[in-house]
Amino acid sequence: MRSFSFYERVSRAFHVYPSLSKLLIVSTVSGGGFIAYAEASSPNDALSPPSSEAEPKKKKVVVLGTGWAGTSFVKSLSNPSYDVHVISPRNYFAFTPLLPSVTCGTVEARSIVEPIRNIVRKKNYDACYWEGECYKIDAQNKKVYCRPVPNNLNGNEEFVVDYDYLIIAMGARPNTFNTPGVEENCHFLKEVEDAQEIRRSVIDSFEKASLPNVSDDERKRILHFVIVGGGPTGVEFAAELHDFVNEDLINLYPLAKDSAKITLLEAADHILNMFDKRITVFAEQKFQRDGIDVKLGSMVVKVTDKEISTKARVNGETTSIPYGMVVWSTGIGTHPVIRDFMKQIGQTNRRALATDEWLRVEGSDSIYALGDCATINQRKVMEDILAIFSKADKDNSGTLTVKEFQEVIEDICERYPQVGLYLKNKKMYDIVDLLKEAKGDVAKESIELNIEEFKSALSEVDSQMKNLPATAQVAAQQGKYLANCFNRMEECTNFPEGPLRFRGEGRHRFRPFRYRHLGQFAPLGGEQTAAQLPGDWVSIGHSSQWLWYSVYASKLVSWRTRALVITDWTRRFVFGRDSSRI
Amino acid sequence: MRSFSFYERVSRAFHVYPSLSKLLIVSTVSGGGFIAYAEASSPNDALSPPSSEAEPKKKKVVVLGTGWAGTSFVKSLSNPSYDVHVISPRNYFAFTPLLPSVTCGTVEARSIVEPIRNIVRKKNYDACYWEGECYKIDAQNKKVYCRPVPNNLNGNEEFVVDYDYLIIAMGARPNTFNTPGVEENCHFLKEVEDAQEIRRSVIDSFEKASLPNVSDDERKRILHFVIVGGGPTGVEFAAELHDFVNEDLINLYPLAKDSAKITLLEAADHILNMFDKRITVFAEQKFQRDGIDVKLGSMVVKVTDKEISTKARVNGETTSIPYGMVVWSTGIGTHPVIRDFMKQIGQTNRRALATDEWLRVEGSDSIYALGDCATINQRKVMEDILAIFSKADKDNSGTLTVKEFQEVIEDICERYPQVGLYLKNKKMYDIVDLLKEAKGDVAKESIELNIEEFKSALSEVDSQMKNLPATAQVAAQQGKYLANCFNRMEECTNFPEGPLRFRGEGRHRFRPFRYRHLGQFAPLGGEQTAAQLPGDWVSIGHSSQWLWYSVYASKLVSWRTRALVITDWTRRFVFGRDSSRI
């Protein structure tokens, strides 16, 4: 149906616009010509089995959220034996890495979104979408309570949806760290609406500053843009804003030329501190050259309507800076619904829902959580050390030979990825080296460890455990992983492919989720981008900007968004950014 | 400065994107290939002289409004001896004929706007723009009082601007005819923001209607779209909405297929009643085939949050219809500031500011008004009949010979255009025929009229006077006319080119404003457009759709908006309209 109408449209278009064929070819070439930066698909993903194994009739899967995790799950699910219901207050998926570009009109908001209904209706399984906000999860009765999204005149009633499996992918909220005045006076940058509002606000500031009765001091205040948080979003926004002001706005607002100022506040010692040191230094130097004032080690303690107060970490000194607009982009906080649900299942005092390595929420049977609202609670080797030992010690001799150990080694590394990381960091190429280290200088074949020696050999490995960052990349991979598990649920129940269950019988049904870091970008403005790719490969400058363009163009959800974003970039090159306050 | 950065951008772009050159050529061709539909420029425009004639230093011209009239004035003004200040709550000009297309995403809002600062800074005169709303005009002291536009956190104070000449071009407000509930429950369609809100509302209605707990009746109510007013805007919106629903939305919202309904309410006997009868009939029949319910002769008497009550003009019967969304598009009302100003200068009980034929506000010296906020008060021949007679009767004989009459005939026709219209309607080719008619069957040369006979000859002509419609075309022509007068103010003061002053000495400085109707379009959906061009030429169907595309593309303010609108059309052809609620 859809493809028909698409072809119909195209042929109609070609019929009447002969020149269109050229246009289409050009955009296809420029789209396709971008370096394909393929995301390596983890071939053998896996998931812990829910208690009820057999699925005679269609199981109802409810997905909460249409962000990276939820959309990636919906897109990758391909098993027609599910009945999928997607519930989210946003009826579209947004390509969030381009949000900072939307704030300044380098890319239009509508170009980076794809209606979830467009995605859902192409699937081979039964799927539907409901625009609503989940306000309560009842795990006991397997129900979620939802209400239509707020801006709703013809008020519908709330609705209740039951599920067999629940996928929580609601993302996170901005984290204000309870700093007074932040909610009231700051802009956030998490949603498409935020980006649009920031854009309007920036233009508005320039208009306000140009009014005839504004004093020089007041103009300086109005045009002082403060960004709190030196992470990738904050840095990219600062860079975009700098370009917007210097490439477009100062031509239109002559008075603003000497008054506009951008300040970036970062509580830590450096901006972009999740990146390689080389990138950090480059970024800081570039910002200095650009006149962006980077204030390191300064924590925001209060925001009023016209002033922002910071405290220096070094000497505790407090300063108040007059500002016109603040964008708050520091870390993420918990969604109230998630917080309530965590209380319900006994996970208190955490930032996010804890799941096992198969993304299943701890303490719940058929609920999975992924993306920014969840963290994987990687099991420690030390917690299971006795079970591992006894499983490995096949002859029950009370000691472990190298041969016995080698038989379970693969399962251990799969179940406890920190072991592999530890070996890599220690530059050990064989896990037997670990045992050797514990045992001292003994011939490899004759090594035999008792439980205490085994414990001491592995005592350090858990230090390698790290939480995954709250990024789009992690969320997208998790969604895909979980969908693959759901796709192969029946197959893997019969032929489990996961690691040995050390504390139980048999094998885990699926392999645990494993994150593959594919690199990270930080656009720094002026067509300079820093890229940190796997293998510690760092690239800074114009070439990375092109890599950035290519990757982002190839990653966009659909040919539609790809074409839109590329034409937006072209428009920006040719005509500059628009300064209309709409 | 600007052009430099533009070329810099382009050359940089071509340097790095070789394929871009193709793209640019294609869009230039498709833009330029559209039939040029040139607006005939009235070569000898004119304006009544303000009292102070000589202009030793730069005169300060304050323009209120950035709509069609204001922008057209600013664009056409080219005399560097003015100091121009533009004040408007919108820092952009919007190409309003495409607003109905924005409501359904056929064209993006940003594509039809051009920042006023972009227009202003290309001018050769001193010009600046202030984003603010005029809330009071003080004609006595030649001052306007303004405040920054509302959505303003860092509240500036109000500001006062003085002027030498004031150009009022603030447009109009939607007219609710004081119908209860309209302000609270209806959408209007006058501003870009309105169109964006309507778009969100339409999507929202479809989402609401698809929720699981919605009954069939409730779904039908939510998806009942009512349009009040069968003028061009209402009709075009109905057509756009019908296409949006049937080409795009029903594929995405399967439940909506049989529930969505569009009703068009018109108080008169026909929709599009300012058009030719053939167009009206065609439109009504097309709407009937499309399933759009056109209810003629029904006046809206009340709107509640879920029902709209109408009264049939024929039998006075009242009906209540449940609805989901109402768009109110019936005529225009007066801006409160204009109403206050009218009180100040003694023009009460009028819808719009009355001006003379040179667009100067009656009763004010240096204030001009144009566009939707003004109407031209054409002077009646009968009011001046004595003055005309005595001016024409050069020899003071008390009678008028044909020769005497012929000498002033041109001035009469210029000063009182109704005379020309009257002759044309009566199919008289010579004005002398008029006199002949009064005098009976006499040889042309021997006609001689006394004052009473002269009066009776011209007694009917004033019946031909018509108010100009409140359209973009009128506003744009007025802006251009007035700018031309300002451009040639000094020249025309020394060598007046207007008609004779019948009630005074000498000639008017400028020719009076004369509107040239260039035709009108009514897009009816499904790529069918009705066009009514000068000379009663009517065209309906696909060919007019292409004419419509061409004219609108050629009329857009800048190459930027032209390229944007054309790419929007292309995108829509290829990908359909977007249904994301943003």
Image: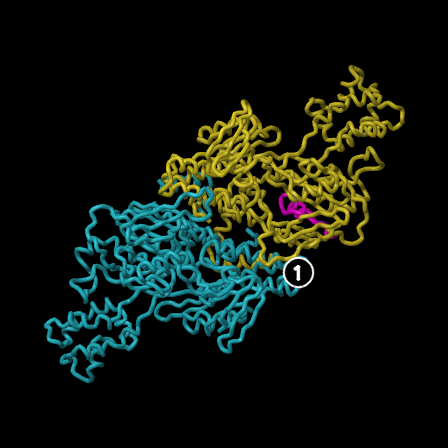
Chain colours: A yellow, B cyan
**Residue type, numbered disc 1:** Val
From the viewer's perspective, tell me whether residue B134 is left or right of residue B578: left
Magenta residue check for A66: yes
Residue topped by disc 1: B214
Q: Is residue B325 above or below residue A519?
A: below
Report the front residue among A350 and B204: A350
Residue segment shown in magenta:
A61-82
Chain name for mark 1: B
Identify the image quadrant of residue A424: top right
Magenta residue check for A488: no
From the viewer's perspective, tell me whether residue B502 is left or right of residue A456: left
SS category of the residue bearing label 1 = loop
From the viewer's perspective, tell me whether residue A513 is left or right of residue B292: right
On the image, the x and y values in percent for residue A393 come to 86, 27
Report the front residue among B513 and B134: B134
Q: Quadrant of the N terminus of chain B?
A: top left
From the viewer's perspective, tell me whether residue B390 is left or right of residue B170: left
